[in-house]
């Protein structure tokens, strides 16, 4: 086996594995968390969630008194919860004490819209990550095998040069001079 092609395939495989790890690929189809990323702050989480809740039809109810602020801060932040009213209707709510200092409230229809928006955003993010990984892979393939450039370009005596060899010409990977 040609050692140059072995190095090229090993380098490509390593780059693809790195791209998948950074893009959050997994065989199960889910996303793996990036171990190098810092977890989002509550404000960053709220910046993602609050607009989805509003677009879905949830109403933001701001804490207007110190007592309401205290009660709001005692609720689990950015976690969807529900209750059933006296008429049997389900209502959904989410506390955001860190960003808007409010409680989002919505009905069943708003909750379903929120879940759809959340799912669409997850699919869009997964598609974006897959496209970035594909672009990275295409860039790596254009660079050629190994870390030095495309095959046939590199140091060597050149075609028909003084040594009569057949090597690369100047740009990257190691050329191999084969005298005839």
Image (spheres, helix red, strand yellow):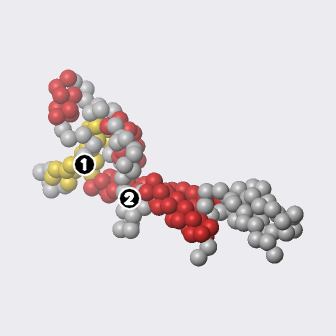
Q: Nearer the viewer, residue 19 or 42?
A: 19
| Most foreground residue, 158 or 57 | 158
| Residue at horizontal 57 percent and vertical 57 percent from the top | 136
In the rendering, at what x and y percent does residue 11 appear? 55, 62
Comes first in the chain, label 2 or label 1: 2
Q: In this orientation, which residue lies closer to the viewer: 122 or 20?
A: 20
- Report whether 51 appears left or right of 85: right
Q: Quadrant of the N terminus?
A: bottom right
Residue 23 in picture, x, y percent from top left: 46, 56
Above or below residue 49? Residue 112 is below
In the image: residue 148, left or right of residue 84: right
Instruction: Say which mark, if any, is on residue 80.
Output: 1
Res. 8 image quadrant: bottom right
From this viewpoint, is residue 120 visible? no
Q: Residue furthest left?
A: 86
Q: Quadrant of residue 174?
A: bottom right
Residue at screen point 28% across, 37% down: 96
Q: Tell me residue 84's x, y (percent).
A: 15, 52
Q: Which mark is residue 31?
A: 2
Q: Which residue is located at x 25 percent, y 48 percent?
A: 80
CA gap, disc 2 and disc 1 = 22 Å
Residue situated furthest top in the rendering = 66
Residue 108 seen in the current view: yes
Secondary element type, mark 1: loop
Badge 1 density bin: few <14, some 14–19, many ≥20, Cα 10 Å: few
SS of the residue under disc 2:
loop
Could you say which disc has been placed on residue 162 in the image? Answer: none
């Amino acid at each position: 086996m040609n050692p140059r092609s072995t190095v090229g395939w090993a380098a490509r495989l390593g780059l693809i594995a790195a791209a998948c790890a950074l893009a959050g690929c997994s065989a199960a189809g889910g996303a793996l968390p990036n171990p190098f990323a810092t977890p989002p702050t509550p404000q960053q989480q709220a910046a993602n969630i609050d607009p989805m809740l509003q677009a879905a039809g949830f109403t933001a109810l701001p804490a207007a008194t110190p007592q309401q602020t205290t009660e709001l801060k005692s609720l689990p932040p950015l976690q969807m919860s529900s209750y059933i009213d006296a008429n049997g209707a389900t209502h959904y709510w989410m506390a955001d004490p860190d960003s808007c200092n409010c409680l989002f409230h919505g009905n069943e229809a708003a909750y379903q819209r929120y879940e759809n928006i959340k799912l669409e955003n997850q699919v869009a993010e997964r598609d974006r990550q897959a496209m970035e990984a594909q672009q990275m892979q295409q860039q790596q393939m254009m660079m050629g095998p190994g870390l030095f450039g495309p095959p046939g370009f590199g140091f060597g005596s050149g075609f028909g040069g003084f040594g009569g060899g057949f090597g690369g010409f100047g740009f990257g990977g190691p050329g191999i001079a084969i005298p005839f």
